[in-house]
Amino acid sequence: MIDLKAKKRMGLAALRRRLGKVQVPVALGMTLVWLLLFDGFRLRFESLGLLVLGFLVSVVIMLVFPLPPITPGFRFRPVYLVRMLVYVFGRMAVASFRVTVQTLSPGPVRSSVVAVPLRTEADLMLVCTAIASSIIPGSVIVEVSQPNHILYVHLLGADDEKGIEAGREDIWKLEERIVMALGTREDVDALRAGPTVDDRREDA
């Protein structure tokens, strides 16, 4: 009887240690990838189930295959986080309308693959920017140059220099909001030290 209770305590302690290794930001990132794979960003009732299922699958994966901790990790700033979410959802709504118009308009749908160099060198910010860009209709990440921190983005409707520059500016604005909401102090300093969107526009 004593051995059984001791085994139960050891089992619960092992489970707590496993649960302690679950990194919520990583699980949320894996959930976003899950939603991308199964088209979970459409406004439908099944999307809620996909969200919950994706998070549970992410937790199970991290329990079975514990991941090393991500350093330095995220730094949550609530005000900037709300601004980032409002910006992303607003971009999704506007981009959805633009994609619909371009798809229904007569003639070929034009697009370009655009190289977008980021201002921060943190891999975590690179991944977050790439994921956020991919969930916005009309933009898809086709390649990531990790050493140079450059995103290669397929932009729908960017068929001239003006459209290409507008697409780059959208990615830079997205990067800025992500870094301000989730980046470390070093990421924020690198962002502020780099050229602004207006500076890039003047250089162009």
Image (spheres, helix red, strand yellow):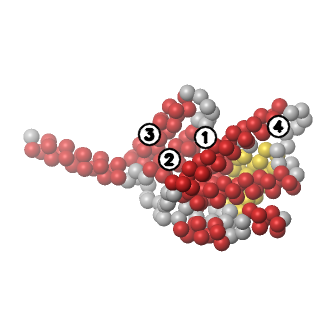
Q: Is residue 64 left or right of residue 31?
A: left
As displayed, is residue 10 above or below residue 51?
Answer: below
Give the CA distance from mark 1 to mark 4. 22 Å
Give the CA distance from mark 4 to mark 2. 32 Å
What residue is pinned by disc 2?
A: 28
Viewer-proximal residue among 113 and 65: 113
Give the CA distance from mark 1 to mark 2. 12 Å
Dot 4, how many residues are within 10 Å of its Cα: few (below 14), some (14-19), or many (20+)? some
Which numbered disc, 4 or 2, marks the residue that appears first in the sequence? 2
Q: Position of residue 54 (x, y in %)?
A: 50, 39
Q: Looking at the image, is mark 3 or mark 4 nearer the viewer?
A: 4
Which residue does the image show at 29% across and 49% down from the upper left? Answer: 16
What residue is pinned by disc 3?
A: 56
**What amino acid does circle 4 point to?**
Gln
Give the CA distance from mark 3 to mark 4. 37 Å
Dot 1, how many residues are within 10 Å of its Cα: few (below 14), some (14-19), or many (20+)? some
What residue is pinned by disc 1?
A: 36
Q: Looking at the image, is mark 2 or mark 3 nearer the viewer?
A: 2
User: Is disc 2 in contact with disc 3, using a CB cutoff of under 8 Å?
Assistant: no
Give the CA distance from mark 2 to mark 3. 10 Å
Which residue does the image show at 9% across and 40% down from the upper left? Answer: 1
**What amino acid does circle 3 point to?**
Leu
Q: Position of residue 15 (x, y in %)?
A: 30, 47
User: Is disc 1 in contact with disc 2, using a CB cutoff of under 8 Å?
Assistant: no
Q: Is any part of residue 37 visible from this angle?
A: no
**What amino acid does circle 2 point to?**
Leu
Viewer-proximal residue among 143 and 126: 126
Residue 91 lies in what quarter of the image?
top right
Which type of secondary structure does the marked residue at label 4 adopt?
helix
What residue is pinned by disc 4?
A: 102
Dot 2, how many residues are within 10 Å of its Cα: few (below 14), some (14-19), or many (20+)? some
Identify the mark at residue 139; answer none if there is no mark: none
